Amino acid sequence: MSPTEVAGGSPLLEVTGLSKAFGKTEVLHSIDLSLNKGSVTVLIGPSGSGKTTVLRSLNGLERPDAGIVTIRGGETLGADDEVRVDFAAPAKPRMRQLQAERLRDRSAMVFQHFNLFPHKTVLQNVVEGPIIVQRRARAEAEAEALALLDRVGLADKRDSYPFELSGGQQQRVGIVRALALKPQLLLFDEPTSSLDPELVGDVLGVLKGLADDGWTMVVVTHELVFARQVADEVLFMDGGVIVERGAPSELFANPQHERTKQFLHRLLFPL
Amino acid sequence: MINWELFWSALGPIALGGLIGTIPVALASFALGLVIALFVALARISGIRVLSALARFNISVIRGTPLLVQLFVIFYGLPSLGLLIDPWPSAVIAFSLNVGGYAAEVIRAAILSVPKGQWEAGFTLGMRRSTSLRRIILPQAARVSVPPLSNTFISLVKDTSLASLILVTELFREAQKVAAFSQDFMLIYIEAALVYWVICLGLSTAQNRLEKRLDRYVAH
Ligand SMILES: Nc1ncnc2c1ncn2[C@@H]1O[C@H](COP(=O)(O)OP(=O)(O)O)[C@@H](O)[C@H]1O
Ligand SMILES: [Mg+2]
């Protein structure tokens, strides 16, 4: 039984046939993906295999050439309130923009290089989305932001500017900025790859806490220990296809495909 | 010998010319010019071919022709097409178009210097392009463009002396009047130069303050 079936009911996110080319280079070849509310999916694979492009497509930052993405409503949205985009269907620019916005409504992205707003303080970074985009009351948005910052141990940095923070602190702000949007789906693109080794643990700890709290997450990462502990399902991508998928215990202990074996071996024994 | 009496009595009209002519013309032209420049810069990076070509053409004409000629076309040329414009508005039109042409490239470069990830961080929060531009990109572009735009403004203040040739009452025209009357050309024109210099020194100081203020969020 695959993890996506465990919880029963229809999956929160369903992706079928996602394909994308940049010019003549085909980057994604008919990716299928399905995940349940509250699950953690880890995406691994060599550099250039298309992991980032998958996340960006889900967040409407990239427009795939084909494929259907369905995100179903959460409890608060009503069961029939779903976003469904068929990228193969012809759409005028205005429609494409609208589709991207509707996808973004449901998910938030945490970037490898944080992409915090350097001209805004930590608190301003976090409340920007809730106040400016979601038009929520400042007092309420700030109170929530401070509670979230407190959770990741950064409440005392509320008035600092990003340049005054370490990489690990910046990425925790990046995570809080995404959480403050209250998205149905959190997307992490190698959230610890640009951190000094001793700072990785803090950020992974935050991610694990979010998983325990029931957030639905897709995480691109090379941290195998994290994947083993936290992931419900691990997908191995190579050359724009999902080569192999399974529960981490199975996939790591007993990879079926030669490419998966080689990739895991290289990660574990880089020399 | 310096005729100090003449020097001090001339300072009044010259400074007044600066106060009611040079400075307001420069301020109005710069403000209007920045608005023009922002739109021209946005047209340049819009990716819409017609807009971008128009913007490039505008920039090319403005930068490729002398400011004095532009001024004369508007003040002495347009009346032959039945379009009579007073000296003051003529000067502001010419100078603001000129600032628009130069500042457009500065603003465009500043916008492009903001990393793409900043746009995308705005998008992932659900912002439209216009909101990202206004709240995320332009404040960062402003920091980058303050030094070159300050230089544009200081050049503009000096260039407003050309407006004396289309009869605008400003610093240099007042100086010319006093000089013609007193016949002490050396003293009066040096005095005019000094007043310009003092104005520009003040502007440089203001520029430094502004740069410090905008630099508060970057590492040193
Ligand atoms: N904007 C782009 N233009 C052209 N090629 C791109 C672009 N973005 C990504 N690619 C290419 O797509 C492939 C997949 O990239 P990416 O999704 O970033 O892989 P990963 O995240 O797994 O390293 C790479 O070969 C990359 O060079
Ligand atoms: Mg990547």
Image (cartoon, rainbow, N blue to C red):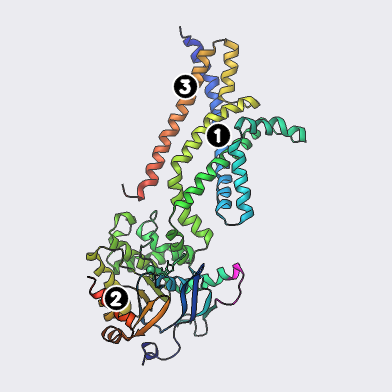
Residue type pointed to by label 3: Leu
Residue at image position (32%, 49%) is B219
Q: Which residue is mark 3?
A: B194
Contact (Cβ within 8 Å) of mark 3 with mark 1? no
**In the image, is the residue at mark 1 within 8 Å of ligand 1 by its beta carbon?**
no
Does the image show residue A207? yes
Which x, y percent locates residue B188?
52, 15
Q: Residues within 10 Å of mark 2 (few under 14, many from 20)?
A: some
SS at circle 1: helix
Contact (Cβ within 8 Å) of mark 1 with mark 2? no
Chain under numbered label 1: B
Residue at image position (60%, 32%) is B66
Q: Give the Cα separation between the discs numbered 3 and 1.
A: 18 Å
A218 w.r.t. B152: above or below: below
Q: Give the Cα separation between the discs numbered 1 and 2.
A: 58 Å
Q: Residue furthest bottom?
A: A1
Residue B48 appears left or right of A24: right
Query: Is residue B103 or residue A209 the one in the foreground?
Result: B103
Residue A209, label in figure = 2
Residue at image position (46%, 47%) is B142
Q: Earlier in the sequence, mark 3 or mark 1?
A: 1
Q: Quadrant of residue A187?
A: bottom left
Task: Mark 1 vs mark 2: tell me if same chain.
Answer: no
Which x, y percent locates residue A259?
33, 80
Which x, y percent locates residue A236?
36, 79
Number of marks present in the image shown: 3
A244 w.r.t. B114: above or below: below
Which x, y percent locates residue A260?
32, 80
Give, as a single range, the part of the protein colored magenta. A87-95
Chain under numbered label 2: A
